[in-house]
Image (cartoon, rainbow, N blue to C red):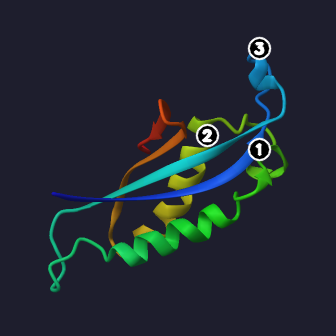
Amino acid sequence: MYEVTIRRSFSAAHTLKEIGGKCEELHGHNFVVEVSVTVPDLNREGLAIDFRVLKRWTEEILETLDHKYLNDIPYFNALNPSAENIARFVYERIAQKAHLQKIRVSRVTVWESEDARASYEGK
């Protein structure tokens, strides 16, 4: 099995409801997102996936989050826009694109600071 990972970033603001403390106040992060995909075999060019393709898919998704107030995005109407839920949001959208090319998304990790991250691995 081969795994390929790319890293991209975006900036956004959010509030986290019902958790107590400062995070319930409006604040922002420079989020870093890692997207990992796996394939059992390489293609004829010797690649799992072209890094440029995976970066483009990720950038298209992150563009919908960049410089936004995440609580206003419909996906987060009933969810806190936590790093965990952002990871799932990105995972689900990347998985839709990857599935068409028979590529499995293995994990999406969202760093909200250099020492705090959350990952989603799907079902």
Give, as a three-letter code, the residue at label 1: Ala
**Can residue 88 be spotted in the picture?**
no
Element on which disc 1 rests: strand
Using residue 44 as the reference point, say whether residue 77 is left or right of it.
Answer: right
Q: Quadrant of the N terminus?
A: bottom left
Q: Residue 21: name its quadrant.
A: top right
User: Mark 2 or 3 closer to N-term?
Assistant: 3
Q: Distance between the Cα atoms at labels 1 and 2?
A: 14 Å
Q: Position of residue 65 (x, y in %)?
A: 70, 57
User: What residue sits right under mark 3 in the picture?
Assistant: 20
Residue 22 sits above or below residue 40 on the image: above
Give, as a three-letter code, the residue at label 2: Asn
Element on which disc 3 rests: loop
Q: Distance between the Cα atoms at labels 2 and 3?
A: 18 Å
Using residue 50 as the reference point, say whether residue 112 is left or right of it.
Answer: right
Q: Position of residue 33 (x, y in %)?
A: 50, 51
User: What residue sits right under mark 2 in the picture?
Assistant: 85
What residue lies at 17% left-to-right and 63% top-to-bottom? Answer: 40
Residue 13 shows which numbered tag? 1
In this rendered view, identify the residue nearer to me: 15 or 28.
28
User: Mark 1 or 2 closer to N-term?
Assistant: 1
